[in-house]
Image (tube, grey):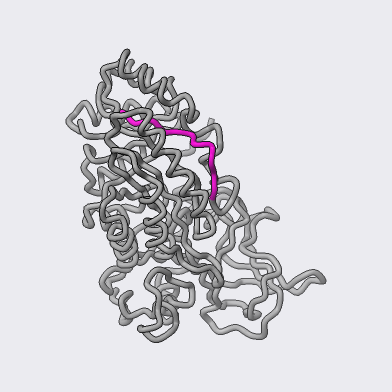
């Protein structure tokens, strides 16, 4: 299928080109005619991924950090088409699990260029990663957050590139559950890092190359003050652990979900980071959400409109199994009625899962829809399909990619048979 309105011709801000802001793609900026045709052809619920937008977002942040190493944090979206597009942009990939490493390699990434951030890694993940390293991926960097992981690597004969994930004691982001910088699960405590570095240098043959920390996820301009202090602390630590090849300050660069939120000011971000970092080491960042967040949209069909004393309930064919972020993080996602809509009133939009958390919004002022109307949920390219589940025996939806005007399925729609095929009777 080829669409008549390519991603390049979609309006960026619903305004003339000279007034648009390339840093953000709002839900209203997607071509409604194209989305309606996709929903008619492929059904709903349906993810749509604009691969051209993925490339544009990566190029923008790579250009802003022109003196730094920019890696893509794969956990935001591991669709093969996304990883292939970024591989074609020569993006290095940061992986937080063995499965992500395998998917990156299958998409064309050089295993020797991958950074593996091992968070309490299962044995099979370490076995797989070390196996790749032993088979020729000698440049793979193992980023570990516990001394016990160092010992487990040593037991496997690993003597390659080692980086320590640091717990900086500073966290920020859109929700407390993603403010990883201050959570004890993540990284070696800041004050213990120099001692551990010396121990590795004295007792192991591994090559200590870097320090890593991640402050949180979904940061916008209001978080830049805390982020600058975080970078300063990592710079000081690098001096204490010298010589250090690189310091990776993670990602967490946010995208605006609400209309009133402004896009992240990349120039101010970069200026603040460079002003706070003066260690003799290369600086690295690993954006994920920034690259793919606004490149995805979710289409869902209205099947029920019910008036209650408290609110008007709008039932749709997508659910918390399709997009869990509202249920998990109380996350806001913009919703647009592509079929028009009536007068504005407080609406609660929910899916078919028998849970009170299965709602996309509650009492949000929106035009009242009718049955069979098509709704679009914006900014779902990061942690949307990635966190989809089969709870309630709900098959995961299809994901349709758009690139250079061409439309192709990049993840097929599951069926109930896909859910049950691995089951057997006792």
Residue located 61% across and 77% down the image: 371
Residue located 28% across and 42% down the image: 282
Q: Identify the magenta region.
A: 162-172
Q: Is residue 358 magenta?
A: no
Outermost residue to the left = 136
Residue located 61% across and 63% down the image: 360
Outermost residue to the top = 203
Q: Position of residue 341 (x, y in %)?
A: 60, 83
Q: How many marks?
A: 0
Instruction: Say which of 401 and 96 sits in front.
Output: 96
**The C terminus sits in image quarter:** top right
Instruction: Say which of 47 and 425 sits in front.
Output: 47
Residue located 41% across and 49% down the image: 251
The reply to whether residue 140 is in sight is yes
The reply to whether residue 413 is in sight is no
Outermost residue to the right = 309
Q: Position of residue 281 (x, y in %)?
A: 29, 39
Q: Is residue 291 left or right of residue 337?
A: left
Q: Is residue 31 left or right of residue 158?
A: right
Does residue 175 sit above or below 341 in this rendering? Answer: above
Does residue 416 sit above or below 191 in this rendering? Answer: below
**The N terminus sits in image quarter:** bottom left
Q: Report which quarter residue 162 is drawn in.
A: top left
């Amino acid at each position: 299928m080829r669409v008549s309105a390519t991603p390049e011709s979609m309006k960026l801000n619903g305004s003339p080109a000279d007034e648009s802001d390339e840093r953000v793609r709002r839900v209203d900026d997607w071509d409604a005619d194209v989305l309606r045709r996709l929903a008619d052809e492929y059904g709903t619920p349906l993810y749509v991924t604009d691969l051209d937008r993925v490339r544009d977002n990566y190029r923008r942040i790579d250009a802003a950090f022109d003196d730094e190493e920019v890696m893509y944090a794969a956990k935001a979206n591991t669709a093969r088409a996304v990883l292939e597009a970024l591989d074609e942009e020569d993006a290095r990939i940061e992986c937080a699990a063995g499965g992500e490493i395998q998917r990156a390699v299958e998409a064309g990434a050089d295993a020797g260029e991958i950074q593996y951030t091992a968070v309490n890694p299962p044995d099979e993940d370490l076995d797989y990663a070390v196996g790749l390293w032993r088979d020729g991926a000698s440049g793979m960097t193992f980023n570990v957050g516990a001394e016990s992981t160092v010992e487990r690597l040593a037991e496997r004969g690993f003597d390659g590139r080692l980086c320590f994930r640091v717990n900086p004691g500073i966290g920020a982001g859109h929700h407390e559950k993603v403010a990883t910088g201050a959570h004890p699960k993540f990284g070696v405590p800041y004050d213990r890092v120099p001692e551990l570095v010396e121990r590795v240098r004295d007792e192991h043959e591994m090559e200590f190359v870097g320090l890593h920390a991640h402050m949180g996820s979904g940061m916008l301009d209001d978080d830049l003050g805390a982020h600058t202090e975080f970078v300063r602390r990592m710079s000081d630590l690098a001096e204490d652990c010298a010589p250090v090849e690189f310091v990776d300050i993670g990602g967490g660069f946010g995208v605006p979900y609400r209309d009133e939120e402004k896009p992240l000011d990349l120039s101010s971000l970069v200026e603040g980071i460079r002003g706070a970092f003066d260690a003799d080491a290369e600086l690295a960042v690993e954006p994920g959400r920034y690259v793919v967040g606004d490149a995805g949209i979710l289409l869902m069909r209205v099947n029920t409109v019910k008036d209650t004393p408290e609110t008007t309930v709008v039932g749709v064919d997508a659910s918390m199994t399709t997009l869990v972020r509202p249920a998990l993080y109380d996350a806001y996602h913009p919703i647009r009625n592509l079929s028009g809509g009536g007068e504005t009133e407080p609406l609660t939009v929910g899916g078919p899962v028998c849970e009170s958390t299965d709602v996309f919004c509650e009492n949000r002022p929106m035009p009242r829809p009718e049955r069979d109307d098509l709704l679009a949920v914006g900014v779902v390219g990061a942690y949307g399909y990635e966190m989809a589940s089969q709870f309630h025996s709900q098959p995961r939806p299809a994901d349709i990619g758009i690139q250079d005007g061409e439309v192709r399925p990049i993840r097929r729609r599951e069926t109930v048979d896909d859910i049950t095929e691995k089951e057997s009777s006792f």
